[in-house]
Structure formats: structure tokens, C-alpha cells
Image (cartoon, rainbow, N blue to C red):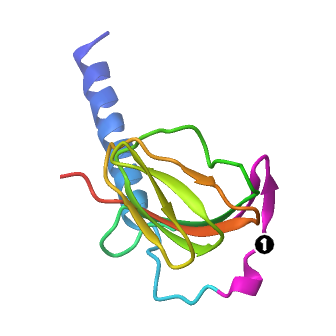
Amino acid sequence: MTRRDLVVAFLSAGLTLSAVSLISARAEVLPSTLFEWSALTPQPNRTGEVRRVVQKPTATLQELEIHITTLRPGEESHPPHQHVNEEILIVKEGQVEALVNGELKRGGPGSLIFQASNQLHNIRNVGSTPATYHVINWKSPSR
């Protein structure tokens, strides 16, 4: 490989990376929005159903992801897991049991659950009717 080939390769790589970062920087940010419940289509899954609300960057967040899950009685969202993102769950209806700081905590309609970064968590429907909760999950820009 000649010196000229190396220069061309580095210039090409630099231009490609610049173009990708410009495209990423222009990703449409979420404006103020009203999400109408009746417009959120439930998608059946193995534990109940989910309504996807949004998954987009905002003016201050790398990504805001909101969905609404309904669990059938006795079902859990997933086995305990953890991730860097923080999230808030708001119970709309039903009775749930959530893993919070290594303890199982129960809550009903109106309960809020904050799951901190890298903490094991999950949620289970412990009632006799479906349990529905809103999940608000966000990714902050890297520091």
C-alpha cells in the first residue's frame, strides 16, 4: 500500500464519519406531543400486550422511549435484568409486585416505581385482573 493510498483511505474514512455524524445530529427531535390512548394499538405478546408510544431523541435526551404494558394475572414482564437507562413505571390498573433495590414491593393504581441505573428489576402482576402500567425510559447523552 502506498502513502497515497493511505491518505485517500484516511480522507474517505473521515468524510464518511463526518457525514454519518451530520445525519445523526439532524435526527428529528420529539416536539411537544399529545399521545391519544385510542390511537395506541395494542400488540399481543406472550405475557399480555404492549402499546408502543414513542422512541425518539428529544432536545435534551439521546432517546426517550415510552410504552404501555398490560400483563395477564400471574405474568411477569421479564426475568430480573438491569441496564444503564433509568426508567419510571406508573401503574394504571391492577396489582403489581416489583423488584426494587433487591426487595419485592407491591403497588396498585397510581403507584410509581423508579428503577435506577444498573439495578436488577422486573415487575409481576400479582392480582386477579390484568395489570397495566406505563414505562418511561430514557438515555442521557454520554458524558
Give the number of marks.
Answer: 1
Quarter of the N terminus within the rendering: top left
Q: Residue furthest right?
A: 44
Residue 54 appears in the rendering: no
Left or right of 108 in this view: 58: left
Q: Residue at x 50, y 60 (%)?
A: 106
Q: From the viewer's perspective, is residue 11 above or below residue 139?
A: above
Percent x, y for residue 107? 51, 66
Residue 102 versus residue 122: which sits nearer the camera? 102
Task: Write the residue at 72% across / 50% down.
Answer: 74
Residue 42 on the magenta segment: yes
Tag 1's secondary structure? loop
Judge whether 38 appears above or below 53 on screen: below
Give 7 or 64, whichever is nearer the viewer. 64
Let me know if residue 112 appears in the view: yes
Going by the image, does 138 lie left or right of 142? right
Residue lying at 67% horizontally and 88% vertically, measured from the top left: 36
The residue singled out by tag 1 in the image is 41
What's the magenta region?
Answer: 36-53
List x then y, in percent, for residue 87: 41, 60
Spot occupied by residue 139 in the image (x, y as percentages of width and height): 36, 57
Crowding at mark 1 (Cα within 10 Å: few <14, some 14-19, many 20+): few
**Left or right of 38: which side holds 121?**
left
**What residue is drawn where x is 40% and y is 43%?**
83
Determine which quarter of the picture holds residue 10. top left
Mark 1 belongs to which amino acid? Thr
Residue projecting furthest to the top? 1
| Quadrant in the picture for residue 55 | bottom right
Q: Is residue 65 above or below residue 116?
A: below
